[in-house]
Image (cartoon, grey):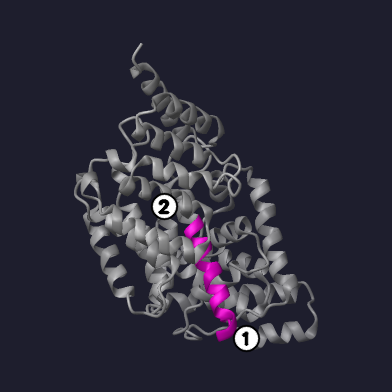
């Protein structure tokens, strides 16, 4: 049977909320996930004929809770556990006003998990992607991804951490983990680090959707606003990032008429609204930089001095060597390529053999007119990158510079 238009989206949005309720109540991630999937299948069977319930979230919670109760009983669980399940058999209106999406995000971004495991678990439990879809996105076998997700859930269970919103003391660190995972998901979707595709819109789109959900639950947090603004301002350029054959088009060469002005307006407004909401954080600074790029109608109109100043603040705040690399580019745009090249020398020990250093050096040597050095570094970068579109772009760039050199 087919669901009515919009019902599939409704089920997708309710899934993490229902899963969050069950995990919080019963403390068993795997069993809760199985029960929610059965409840969703029941909705697909019944709702087309019976209609969507007045309280679809409560219906799903009740159905999934009964599945878990039946499972515990059939397995002859200990009396205490069985009684707990029976007494907590949900009614349709139970905790209807409480949204557990954010709680589930905090759980999936547990500090004990590696970023790779947290990303996979978040996409599975909160994003609703199948194990096969996640495995395909990260170019690993489905069995491997399934094991990674299973180990992540077991590690959370073994930690004994209760399923609840972190205390005020814990919140800063845990929220930082949540935002970092969402940022990594978006980054991998916007500029895939491996494989033949430059971008995976299903990942970047899911990261934006989840970040919107977090922002809706905590609208007063400036860093959440900053992260959402950064995603929107960056994603606004996506229509101009590739050519007809999927080839990479760098920022300076993009047709800015193709940029999504609706996303730019929303992103800039978020940046403006975030100002004054506590201390300025890393995502707000990155969003401010992205806004300066997006406001420039032409590449030559870019306010590089202001961008350089913001990168200076961001580097001091984060200590991230990749920020130092981008600051070197901004410095070259303001003070000339020689300045940028000198700044890169300080990063060789911090980023030994990283292909991004060769990419930037190639660009700066090209700016300086040293084509031979530019070709050398572009080729070195092409040999190290794991992104096929980027490899093609760098190889083509080197070939064009080589062919244009005077005989």
Secondary structure, mark 2, is helix
Rounded to the nearest whole Å, what is the CA distance between mark 1 and mark 2?
Answer: 55 Å
Q: Nearer the viewer, residue 366 or 228?
A: 366
Span highlighted in magenta in the image? 165-184
Instruction: Give me the residue at 37% from left, 77% from top.
Output: 219
Q: Quadrant of residue 106?
A: bottom right
Instruction: Give me the residue at 23% from left, 58% from top.
Output: 262
Q: Nearer the viewer, residue 202 or 17?
A: 202
Q: Say left or right for 190 vs 142.
A: left
Q: Quadrant of residue 394?
A: top left
Q: What percent of the width, then of the height, locates residue 355? A: 53, 38
The residue at which mark 2 appears reads as: 327
> Residue 8, relative to residue 245: is it above or below?
below
Tell me if mark 2 has few (under 14), some (14-19) or many (20+) residues whose alpha carbon lies within 10 angstroms of its own: many
Q: What percent of the width, then of the height, locates residue 70? A: 68, 75
- Residue 176 inside the magenta-drawn segment: yes
The residue at which mark 1 appears reads as: 88
Tell me if mark 1 has few (under 14), some (14-19) or many (20+) residues whose alpha carbon lies within 10 angstroms of its own: some
Q: Quadrant of the C terminus?
A: top left
């Amino acid at each position: 049977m087919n669901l009515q238009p919009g019902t599939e989206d409704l089920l997708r949005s309710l899934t993490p909320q229902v899963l969050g309720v069950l995990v919080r109540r019963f403390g068993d991630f795997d069993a809760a996930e199985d029960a929610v999937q059965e409840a969703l299948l029941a909705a697909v069977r019944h709702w087309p004929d019976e209609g969507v319930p007045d309280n679809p979230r409560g219906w799903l919670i009740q159905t999934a809770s009964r599945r878990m109760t039946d499972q515990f009983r059939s397995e002859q669980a200990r009396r205490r556990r069985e009684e707990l399940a029976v007494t907590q058999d949900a009614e349709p209106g139970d905790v209807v006003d409480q949204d557990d999406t954010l709680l589930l995000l905090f759980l999936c971004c547990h500090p004990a998990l590696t970023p790779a495991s947290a990303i996979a678990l978040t996409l599975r439990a909160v994003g609703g992607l199948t194990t096969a879809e996640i495995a395909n996105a990260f170019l690993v076998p489905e069995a491997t991804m399934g094991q990674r997700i299973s180990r992540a859930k077991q590690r959370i269970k073994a930690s004994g951490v209760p399923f609840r919103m972190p205390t005020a003391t814990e919140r800063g660190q845990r929220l930082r983990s949540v935002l970092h995972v969402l940022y990594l998901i978006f980054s991998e979707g916007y500029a895939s680090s491996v494989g033949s595709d430059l971008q995976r819109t299903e990942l970047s789109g899911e990261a934006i959707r989840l970040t919107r959900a977090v922002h809706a639950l905590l609208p007063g947090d400036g860093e959440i606003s900053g992260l959402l603004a950064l995603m929107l301002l960056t994603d606004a350029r996506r229509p101009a990032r590739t050519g007809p054959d999927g080839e990479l088009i760098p920022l300076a060469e993009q047709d800015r008429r193709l940029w999504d002005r609706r996303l730019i307006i929303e992103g800039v407004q978020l940046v403006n609204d975030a100002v004054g909401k506590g201390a300025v954080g890393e995502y707000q600074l990155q969003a401010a930089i992205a806004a300066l790029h997006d406001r420039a109608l032409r590449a030559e109109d870019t306010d590089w001095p202001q961008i350089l100043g913001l990168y200076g603040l961001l580097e001091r705040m984060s200590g991230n060597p990749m920020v130092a690399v981008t600051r070197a580019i901004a410095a070259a745009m303001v003070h000339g390529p020689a300045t940028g090249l000198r700044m890169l020398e300080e990063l060789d020990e911090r980023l030994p053999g990283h292909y991004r250093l060769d990419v930037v050096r190639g660009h700066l040597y090209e700016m300086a007119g040293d084509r031979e050095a530019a070709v050398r570094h572009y080729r070195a970068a092409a040999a190290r990158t794991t992104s096929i579109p980027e490899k093609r772009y760098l190889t083509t760039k080197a070939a064009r510079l080589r062919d244009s050199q005077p005989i």
